[in-house]
Image (cartoon, coloured by chain):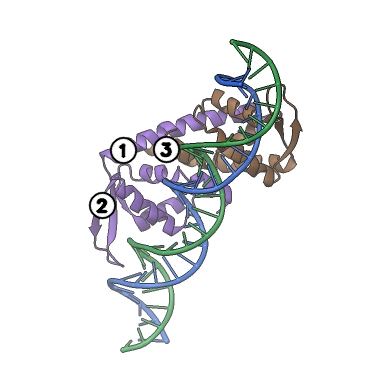
Chain colours: A purple, B brown, C blue, D green
Amino acid sequence: MGKQMTEMLKGTLEGIVLALLTGKAAYGYEITTLLREQGFTEIAEGTVYALLVRIEQKGLVDVEKRPSEKGPPRKVYTLNAQGKNELDEFWNTWSFLSERLEELRKEGN
Amino acid sequence: MGKQMTEMLKGTLEGIVLALLTGKAAYGYEITTLLREQGFTEIAEGTVYALLVRIEQKGLVDVEKRPSEKGPPRKVYTLNAQGKNELDEFWNTWSFLSERLEELRKEGN
DNA sequence: TTTGGAACCTAGTATTGCTAAGTACCGGTA
DNA sequence: TACCGGTACTTAGCAATACTAGGTTCCAAA
């Protein structure tokens, strides 16, 4: 992963995962796969699991264990009310930053 | 500063400062003021100085000391060729992330 | 002399993504 | 049976970066 991307993901990856969970519960391995499909091809597996632990501890998601036919049980994450709030805030913060950067890019000669 | 914004600035603040330096040299105190005017009202002064040390050590800027009428000498930073390359890469990384996020936002129901 | 603003510096902390290694479960294959 | 590969999750230690909270220097004005 490019160093720039790694640093830029700090603070956005959590929002990205929360957004992925909107309207659709998912488990860790699945989320990693989704991220890779969306173009984040080099996201480390461990990164995702660590992030999921974090958002669970923050109370942004509800967790349910479900058996899998192909391996150890899955931990399925569902966005709860608090998680939705956090996601709203994330979009606000993102919008602000995004607008500032687009202005800066325009000015750049 | 909101915690989300703090985390989101990781990886973008450097790009923002490089962008500010495009076509216009500036010194630390001035850059801090510029950032505040652009809406980043709570950027810590120490953060900017530390960042300037970093980009100087990475060789992205040239530095010149100039006397000031009102205090200790200013350190004026100018974007050099390597800095312009870094800024280009920054915009590429930013564009990628930005596009992914806009897609995610659209999908969010 | 003291105060305040301009201008810069830095040690320590918290957060977060990555590296690298591991465990558990199961089906297929030699 | 024994092994391998894919699914699925976990964790300890490291690196990068923004913040906190102090500090220093210089000069002019009160």
Residue at 52 percent across and 44 percent down: it is A8
Residue corresponding to mark 3: B3
Q: Can residue B33 be seen here?
A: yes
Q: Is residue B45 above or below residue A6?
A: above
Give the CA separation, mark 2 to mark 3.
25 Å
Residue C26, image quadrant = bottom left
Contact flag, marks 3 and 1 (Cβ < 8 Å): no
Q: Secondary structure at mark 2?
A: strand
Q: Can residue B109 be seen here?
A: no
Q: Secondary structure at mark 1?
A: helix
Q: Secondary structure at mark 3?
A: helix
Going from the N terminus, do you reach mark 1 or mark 2 first? 2
- Name the chain letter of the residue that bears numbered label 1: A
- Name the chain letter of the residue that bears numbered label 2: A
**Residue A55, percent from left and from top:** 34, 47
Q: Give amino acid for label 2.
A: Val
Residue corresponding to mark 2: A63
Residue corresponding to mark 1: A84
